Amino acid sequence: MIFSYDFIVLGSGLAGLNFALDVAEHGSVAVVTKRGLSDSNTNWAQGGIAAVSASDDSFSMHIADTLSAGAGLCKEEIVRLCVEEGPTAIRRLEELGVRFSRKDDGESYDLGREGGHTRRRVLHVDDFTGRKVQSALAESARRHRNIHILENHTAIDLIMKYKMSGDRRDRICLGVYAMDKATGEVKTITAPVTCLATGGAGKVYLYTSNPDAATGDGVAMAARAGARVANMEFYQFHPTCLYHPKAKSFLISEALRGEGGVLKRINGQSFMEKYHPMASLAPRDIVARAIDTELKASGEECVLLDMSAKSADFIRHRFPNIHAECLKYGIDISSEPIPVVPAAHFLCGGVITDLLGRTDIGGLYACGEVACSGLHGANRLASNSLLEAAVMSMRAARDARSVYHERINETLLRAVPMWDTGRAVPSDELVVVSHIWDEIRRFMWNFVGIARTSKRLERAERRIGLIRQEVEGYYWKYNLTADFVELRNIALVAELIIRSALLRRESRGLHFNTDYPFTDDENYRHDTII
C-alpha cells in the first residue's frame, strides 16, 4: 500500500518540526521519526541559540566569530544570512511557545557566552534549552490537523526516479521507504517534497554526547541516492562530557565555561592558557585537542572543570538541570569540580545544500545537522547549530511551498514501486549486527578521533571496506531490522568520514593529522566533496 502526502519530513528535531509546521499550512505533512517525537539531538541541547540581541553586539561581530571558528572554510554568504535572520527565527520560536530566560527586569534576555564568542549572545532556557524548544514544537505539531506523525518508523532509503534532461541525468526524490517497527511492515510513503532533518551521526564513535538515534541516516540515504556530501572529516568533539562509569556521556554545557568555569588537571593546575589566548573559552576544537593532549601526557582519565569562582546559589539557579543530573552520580557541582572528557558531538559536514536548503536531488531538501550549508566550515561556533536549524528550515520551507505546485503533477504521474523483499529470509545471526557495530565505533574512536595519523586512517579505510562488503551482503540476504538499517548507515558514514580525512593532507579546524600538523591554504582551503 502507498501512503501519499504533500510533504515528507524525516526527523523530529528543531529543523524537522519547524519545516513541518511551516509547510503544513499548504498541504498534508508526514513527519517520520524512528523513535518518539522528542527523541532528537535538539532535545539534548543544553547551551542555547546564538543570535544577536544585545546592544553591545552586532551582526558583524557574530559573523566574525563564526568565520574565525570555521578556520577558513565557512561560506560567508550563508554565515551572513543565518546571523542576520537569527532574530526572526527567535521570534518565530517565541510565537510557538518557547520562553527564553530573561533578566530580573523581565524584559532583556539573560544571555550566555560560550567558547569562541566575543560577546554574550546565547539565548537559553536555563540549561535545558533544547528540551523546551523540542517540547514547544512537538506540542504544536501534535495539534496541527495537517501533520501526521509516524513515530517508531525507520527510514530505509529514499525512493528515487531518474530522467534525462538534455545530456544530463536528473535525480528526483519521490519519497521514502520506512519500516514500521511495531509490525515490521515496510511502507511506501510518497510526496512531491521530502526534507531530510535526521540530525547527526555521533553513534559512529564509541563515546558521544548524542542520543542513540544519531546514526547518520540522512547522510547515508542521500549518499546512496547520489547526492554530494562534503566535509565529513570535520567531526566536532565536545570537550566536556561528564566522566563517570554510570553516566552515558552526559553533556556538561559550554555555558559553564562561559560563566567562569576553568579547566584544570587532577592536581588543580589550569592548562588552557598554554593553548589559546581565550584559555578555557577557546573554540571547541582547540579545547578538545588540548584535553586530549593533557590526558595522553599525564595518563590520567579525565580533567576537571572548576566552577568555584561562582557561588553555589548562582550555579544551582543558572544550571539546575546539570546540577541535578550530576547529583545523581554523587557530584555536587556547586561545591566540587566536575570530572570531564571529550566526546563526539556534532557533524560539521553533511549533505551539500544551497542557500534554500536544496540538495542535488530534485524535490529533496536538507536542514539542520544532516546538511552542509557552509555555515560551520571546519569547526562550528558554539550554539550556532540550533541557529542554523531554525533559519535554514524556515528558508527551505519557504522554497518548498513555492515549488510544490510545480512538482505535484509531474511527480504523482509516476508509478512508484512498492518495497520488494526479494528472496530475503529471517536472520538467525543478530549477534553479527551488534559485533560489527561495536567494532566500527571502537576503531573510529581510536583511528579517526580527535588526533589522527595517516597510518591509522589507512588502517581504518581497509577495515571499513571489508565491513561494508559484509554489511551489503547481509542486506541482500536477510530481512531487515531497525538495528541493521542503523548499522548499514553507520558503516557508510564511517567510510565517508575516513575517505574525507585521507583526502585532507593538512590540519584545519576539527581535522588534526599529526603527519600534517600545518594548515595549507594554497592546496586545501576548499571543501572536501564526495
Image (cartoon, rainbow, N blue to C red):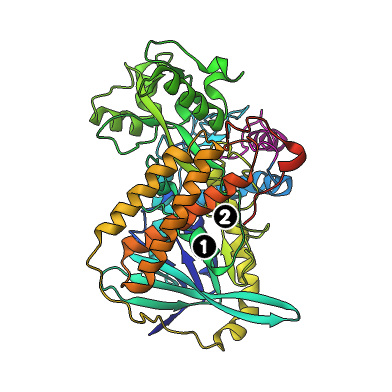
Residue 233 picture quarter: top right
Element under disc 2: strand
Element under disc 1: strand
Residue 69 included in the magenta stretch of the image:
yes
Residue 35 included in the magenta stretch of the image:
no
Tag 1: residue type?
Leu
Residue 445: x and y in percent read 42, 40
Label 2 – label 1 distance at C-alpha: 8 Å
Instruction: Tell me the number on the disc at residue 28.
Output: none
Q: Can you see residue 391?
A: yes
- Image position of 410 with respect to 28: above or below: below
- Image position of 158 with respect to 342: above or below: below
Does the residue at mark 2 contact the one at mark 1 (Cβ under 8 Å)? yes
Which residue appears at 55% of the width and 51% of the height? 390
Q: Nearer the viewer, residue 290 or 381?
A: 290
Which residue appears at 65% of the width and 79% of the height? 406
Residue 53: x and y in percent read 61, 37
Tag 2: residue type?
Ala
Return the disc, 2 or 1, that comes first in the chain's sequence.
Answer: 1
Residue under circle 1?
Answer: 196
Residue 150 picture quarter: bottom left
Instruction: Tell me the number on the disc at residue 371.
Output: 2
> Image quadrant for the N terminus?
bottom left
* In this rendering, position of residue 435 left or right of residue 396: left
Residue 444: x and y in percent read 44, 44
Query: How many marks are shown on the rendered structure?
Result: 2
Residue 443 picture quarter: top left
Q: Magenta stretch?
A: 48-72
Which residue appears at 48% of the width and 19% of the height? 260
Residue 267: x and y in percent read 38, 10
> Image quadrant for the C terminus?
bottom right
Q: Can you see residue 199?
A: no
